[in-house]
Image: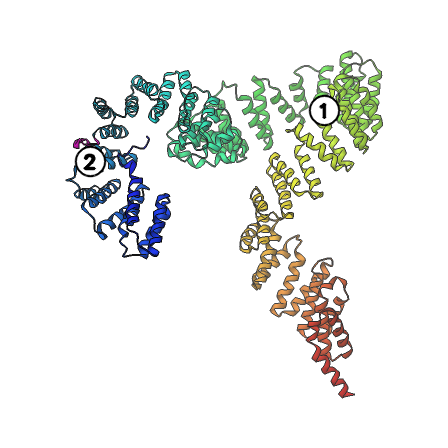
Amino acid sequence: MREVKQGVMVLFKRKFLCAALITLSANLAYGNMKEDVAFLNELYKQERYDMAVSESKKFIVNYPDSKYNKNICERMAKVYFIKKDYKEAEIYFQKLLTEYKLKKDEKKEVSSYLYRINMIYGNTVKANEYAKEFETDEKVLEKTFYDSGVILLNNGKNPDAVREFSKVVNIKGDYYEPAILYLAMGLYNNGQYGDSLKYLDFYNGLQSQSKDIPLLTYLYGSSFYKLNDSNKAAAYFEEGLKNYPNDSYSKKGRITLIEIYTNRGEIEKALMLYSEIDRESDRKTGARVLGDYFLSKNEYKRAINFYDTIGENKSDGVRYTYAYAHYKLSNYKKAVSEFEKINDSRYLLNSRYYLVLSCYNMKDYKKAVSFEKYLPEYEMDGKKYIDLCVVFANSYYEMGENTKSYEYYKGIYKDYPTADNLYRVIVLETKIDAEKNLEASFEKYKTEFPEDKNYKKDIYLAVGNYYYKKGRTADAEKIYKDYMKTDNNIEVGNNLVNLLINEKKYSEVIHYLNMMEETNDSSYLKGIAYMGVGEYAKADEFLAPLKNKEGIGKELKEKVTYNIIKNNFLWEKYEEVIKEGEEYLAGAYIYGLDDIVDRMGLSYYRLGNYEKAREYFAKLAVVPEYSGYAKFQTADSYFAEKNYKKAKEEYKLVYTEKSGKKYEEEAKYWELNCDLSLNDKESYLVESESFLKNYPNSSYIRNILSIRGEILKGAGNSAEAVKEYENLYEKSELAEEKDTTIEKIVELYDETENIEAKSQWIEKFSDKYKKSYYKSLAYREKGMVSEAQAEEKILIENEKYKDYALINLANDYFNEEKYTEAEKNYKAVRELESSQYKDLAIFQMGNIYAVKGENDKAEVELSKVFVLYPESQYVIPAKLKLADVYDAKGDKSKAKEGYKELLNDKKAGEYKEYLTEKLLFISLEEKNRGEAEKYYGELQKINKEIAAKYDDFMKTETEENKEEQ
């Protein structure tokens, strides 16, 4: 509803401000006050009300006795009122009443404002108190009630507005006519459509030229529509559009008319009407109506097109239908993103239902089960409840959480005992190893669903396979045989044959494979059966005698000879394959000739005779259907020979002809490997980029992306390498693969010092311990020690990262001088079976003992560092600390020896200053003048300031020597 005109109030804003300005301008003082008043006038003229009010408050504070304060107070009150800040307005209107002397008319005006303010707040009693001030002035009274009604109507307080307009109607003054119309509007807004029509009729009957006919027409149409009289409603809305096409209420009526047309099925009329909309807000509202219509007709794409017109700022009701349309079109990702934005409780139940189904259809099982907590809310809706149970059951199954899946299907079967549901229960009982329950369920299936054909094979296979894996061979055998008594299924039969072969029940194998008497054919089939299960020697026992047996038919002999070669190939007897293959090709055989040539070529290949292999692949290449395959094998032989340049040329030839097209992807992949083997990294990057574009679903993509990343990383192009790894991450399916890729990305961001990006990727680790490890590293890099320690306490649980966690915690305790805790953690590192930190742990324990004054223990631990780990980075620090320990013990000889050894060790160069000073000090203590002068001179070269500390000692020594002389 457009905002109702407030009678004279539409002109009020400018009028009262201008009047106030005139009043102030006429009474200007001089000096500072004059300037401030002029400033206020300009602020109000320019409608800069926020600053005007702020400056007005300052004016009153600065000039508390000014005669202009009354006018200023009035202006502030009215500005707050216009800005709908009624609390502040009330404060200043009250201030006018209590602090300033007002004329009678002024009091009436202020009381009128205070009446309206209190009516807005629902303070009727207080409002009526103010009304007493002007109750005898009918003009003021009527205008006050009318303006109050308008404000209440615009604020949605329809019952109060109706009462105010009723008072105006009873007065029958200047606002009589509009009050009747707005009274009808208030009744309509309040849902009193019949009463609204009565007043609309009354208003319509008035003999007046100033009636608001567009609004009247709109209210007629809306009231009839609410009373389900669509025909009358449509007539009024059509009349409004015809007679007053540019009026806002006629345009608003157009939306309801579109809804009426769609309800009637007059979609063309609705669409025509929609095309005439010129206001953006109306276009969006109309789009909602048409979107809902097409949704109801299952025309989801058209529905979405209209919903898209609304833009992003959709109500939850529209967003729900929009998301539902995407769901129906299988646009699950978009559906999820929209369903997730819904917060209105009226739509939450259904939106969550379809959100779960969308996640499931997207195979985002983890997200689907995250809504499991809402399942009880669907107990009153049987279908949705069961649907969600099935989704959660299947999701847990896909996630490998078979126990949770099983619990769901048990419940589903209890409520809906069908063969379908029992089948799922049985399968899950095999997964969770519920042996006793499985036995009961299998018996239940056989007794309750004896005629079932849909699930029988799968159930017998599942139970039989389970028993076989459990070692219950006899039970598995019985189940397979029971099935084969009434049904003949290859898969069940193969399982039975495999079981019988493993049990060496060959007579039964023959029975189930051949179902015939002992003949040349049955012997042949036995050989085939043994070859099929990898028993090549046993297969040869049946096949070889048949080759030269008299009376054997030509066709069978040909098949026997062919399968002997095939059996030897599978047996990896490649020389036999070549020998017998040559005989086969030289004979009159035609069965499987191409396959024999292929196996001979492959035999030479596997024996490392690549040139000979290529001869046979060349023969095979003349056969059109084998041409591409043969050329690929030829190229492969050059690759195996490490002739990568030639191999690349041959791979290219594979897919240049039609028969090789099916090998194109694989040939191009191996072309790339040729570039890699030739160390032509530039070519690899160019060609692999083309490969990725042409084969976006290739099984080789992850390997290629990984190699590209390594090449770019090696070339120092970290940004591009990251892109490759990010792409690899998206393409990877296994959590372990994703985590490995994340490690590479984190490493690159670490090199480029992109801390924010690195942190974001660390959060994507699926492995709890890898995530904690990298978070620990990141926290320590930022100096966030307590946060790092929290992660390291998690890592202690994991064998891979335990030593890392322990050494860091130990070092922290050491730095905090908590030596007992530090020692405990260092010992834990040392007790690990293997750790890269053992040398550091031993070194630090030596330091702890040294700090505690336990020098003998310190000596042992520090010695272990360079004895057990001579290549350790802590050898020099340990030797230095050991020399300090000797010094602390008073063993100057050993200390001196240790310092001297280190001073002569190039690896201890960073400690040269410290070592020189220590030796100088010891020389002075020993009064060894020669050595003291030597080290003093060395120290002066290294650090004159440090050497200067010993100047007096050296002079004293010199003087003492002179005296002694």
Say whether residue 447 is visible.
no
Q: Looking at the picture, which amino acid does disc 1 mark?
A: Tyr
Left/right of residue 623 with respect to residue 235 in the rendered view: right
Left/right of residue 750 with respect to residue 672 in the rendered view: left
Mark 1 Cα-neighbour bin, 10 Å: few <14, some 14–19, many ≥20: some
Q: Nearer the viewer, mark 2 or mark 1?
A: 2
- Sequence-wise first label, 2 or 1: 2
Left/right of residue 627 with respect to residue 381 in the rendered view: right
| 670 or 74, nearer to the observer | 74
Q: Residue at x 28, y 52 (%)?
A: 69
Asked if the magenta segment contains residue 412, the reply would be: no
x and y, in percent, of residue 101 in the image: 21, 51
User: Which dot marks residue 928?
Assistant: none
Residue identifier under label 2: 142
Q: Quadrant of the N terminus?
A: top left
Residue identifier under label 1: 663
- Is label 1 in a helix, a strand or a loop? helix
